[in-house]
Image (cartoon, rainbow, N blue to C red):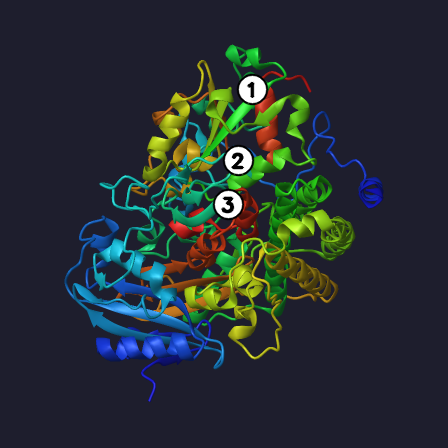
Amino acid sequence: MSPFLTLKNGGSCSMSALPQCGMDEFRSASLQAVNQEQCRVSAFFALGNNCPQNTQKGECTKEVEKSLLVEILLDPQQKCLRVLSTEVCEKYPSLTAEAPAFHWFERELFEETGILPEGHPWLKPIRFADKNREPGVTDYFTMEGEAVHEVAVGPVHAGVIEPGHFRFQCMGEDVFSLEIELGYQHRGIEKMLVGGPDVRTTHILETAAGDTSVAAMLNYCGILEALCQIEVPARGVALRRIALELERIANHIGDLGALAGDVAFLPTSSFCGRIRGDFLNMTARLCGNRFGRGLVVPGGVRYELDKAGAEELLKKVQVGEKELQEALSLMFDEPTVLDRFENTGVVSTETARQIGLVGVAGRASGLAVDCRGDLSENGFVPAVEQGGDVLSRALVRRRELEASLAEVKGLLESLRGGESRSTAVLPTALPNDTLCVHLTEAWRGEICHVAITDGQGRFRRVKIVDPSFHNWFGLAMALRNQQISDFPICNKSFNLSYCGHDL
Amino acid sequence: MFDALSARLSQGYRTGAFPPAQPNLPEHFAGRPVVSKDVDVESLQPICPTGALCRDCAGASAIDTGKCIFCGKCAEVCKGISFKKEYRMGAMHREALLATDAEYHPEEQLDRGIARLYGKSFKIRQVSAGGCAACELDFNVLNTLAWDMGRFGIQAVASPRHADAILVTGPVSDNMLLALKKTYEAMPKPCLVIASGTCAISGGIYATSPQVNAPLDGILPVDLYVPGCPPHPAVLLEALLRLIAIRK
């Protein structure tokens, strides 16, 4: 019999009902689920027995007392989430060697709690959250030899982007290995969320990754609504989906334009830069903010869209779509562009599966990973490409753009009257000692939030797993045996979030 | 090549008319607020996520736009507060960010000192220090042809050695403090420091985190404050143009 508890998306369980088993059983069940039953790791973290007040003050960060190791797996075959826990003291046998998808999670666990995953092949911090550690100062893979050289880039990059540190081991132009050190954007988000929900909670989650605010809020509201049994009116659901797809559209357009820019194909780069802005302005039409801040609230959406507004928006989407098609055809019909994209930065299907890629990058490597279809029986067909290269990651975005544009148009055309926000009032405290988990397919991939409440109905823990958390290692793999000059297009083709990872 | 030319013809010339025309701001745009004298800011403080409701030095009710993330929650419950379409929010002095019911004169919020030197060539090195990427993205947008800040001689550069100004976003996370200082030290002096976005000005929503070092003006001498979460491209561009005294 399976030791897992199964939950639907947004499902919750009392902490006393959380299944717990011995470490041996935990390991074998986890490995079987990930290696043989196509499950993917959505969250894997330790819950200390410490009281939340202590955590907030930053004390007792190294709890060597018994902690509870909690694991959430996404099971695409059963269309559900699987939950399991086990008790752990100072150490346990690492899962990474047998299931590399745990690699980053175990490093995070070790950094946060000091619990040692024994036998982890490359155990070092991912965020350098410890004030006594200098960011980026750690061991790196090195190579020796006459023609070997190391290239170190960042944390401050040449362009206007977030900081991160990249170490390339090269022989001539060829990259043998790339290591990515992050943590420069670490703001201590998860600690700030303890003791909530309060007036800051939504704003903190909206800015965990500031280009994914709508999806993050949808996900967080999914948790609150599930815990408090609030029903979102149909119109609210539709307006939320419009906002979510507008976010996806704007970001995918930006990424395709940036890819064009990196291979010096300027027409598409220029057009897309501008068209992306037009779609951001459509989001601003909904709520005043180009990133959708403040639009999604528990129970629905905060701003009304009148009939004239919906018609105006529909016209803008139609115009934007036409201009976008022209801009993209130029690029995808251009042999010199395709030559740069094809077979560049390949991540094979097998590697992608092993390291647990999600979202656009996962789908471009032939994995049908998309929690829009993986967590409910709705017949959703994800856009999957087989190449695993820059071209595949571009094509996935192009196909998703078509689907999202069609969806937004359909939603705007069929938008009906009624309430867009539930009149139910959020209770001051959430149900006590409860675990709730929710996933949303954001434009980069799946965001997972796990909320655990304490005896007073306040957040004891909010675990955030951004899609970038799964995918940064994929970028490192994509660079193997590539020319270092292809790094920019490989990087843009993933376009991962630093702040969403660093939290 | 002919396809590219024909696409250029059909897409047309798309650089916005701002400036000198007014920017096209969305209906729900929240700009510099007006706070009437009778607003009891103390009683409203619990609903403000960033503690932006305050009093100015004369005791008048105010919103500190250097702390405000423009969520509008206070205006929802208090009639005396309204967020206006005023987008000219950039200021050279921190106190000028306090919005009361007094008349606001953005043209006074600048200092024609060294900024004038930069004429039509102003090079900016941007440093993201704990930002959520939104400030960075909406600064990048000024490079697109929709805003085209290059037409005013403003350009983002890769090397701090080429930069006239450093534009900092984010609440200055512990892990970016050293890199930020090193970038500043590498710049030729005199140079300008721009705090762009609420996080850089005050820490914003992250002000209470023990892992951030905001406000930026406690670390570097700030010459221009640009409020917003993130600042709308029009807010930032207008502030930059006013800073370097480009006539619009």
Give the quadrant of the N terminus of chain B: top right
Q: Amino acid at mark 2?
A: Gly
Q: Mark 3–mark 2 contact, CB under 8 Å?
A: no
The quadrant holding residue B86 is: top right
Label 3: how many residues lie within 10 Å, few (<14), some (14-19) or many (20+)?
A: some
Q: Which amino acid is tagged 3? A: Cys
> Which residue occupies the extreme bottom position in the image?
A1
| Disc 1 crowd, CA 10 A, few/some/many (<14, 14-19, 20+) | many
Give coordinates of residue A457: x percent, y percent: 31, 65
Q: Chain of mark 1?
A: B
Rendered residue at 43%/63% (across/down): A448
Reading the image, the residue beneath label 3 is B71
What chain letter is assigned to the residue under label 3?
A: B
Left or right: B86, with A98 as reference point: right
Callout 2 crowding tier (Cα within 10 Å): few <14, some 14–19, many ≥20 = some
Q: Secondary structure at mark 1?
A: helix
A35 above or below A221?
below
Earlier in the chain: of badge 3 and badge 1, it is: 3
Q: Is residue B17 visible?
A: yes
Rendered view: B231 above or below A245: above
Q: Residue B196, position in %: x, y?
A: 49, 32
Quadrant in the rendering for residue B119: top right
Residue under label 2:
A159
**At 70% from the left edge and 39% from the top edge, which residue is drawn?**
A266
Q: Amino acid at mark 1?
A: Leu
Question: SS class of the residue under badge 2?
Answer: loop
Residue under pointer 1: B243
Check disc 3 and report its element: helix, strand or loop.
Answer: loop
How far, Cα to Cα, is label 1 from label 2?
23 Å
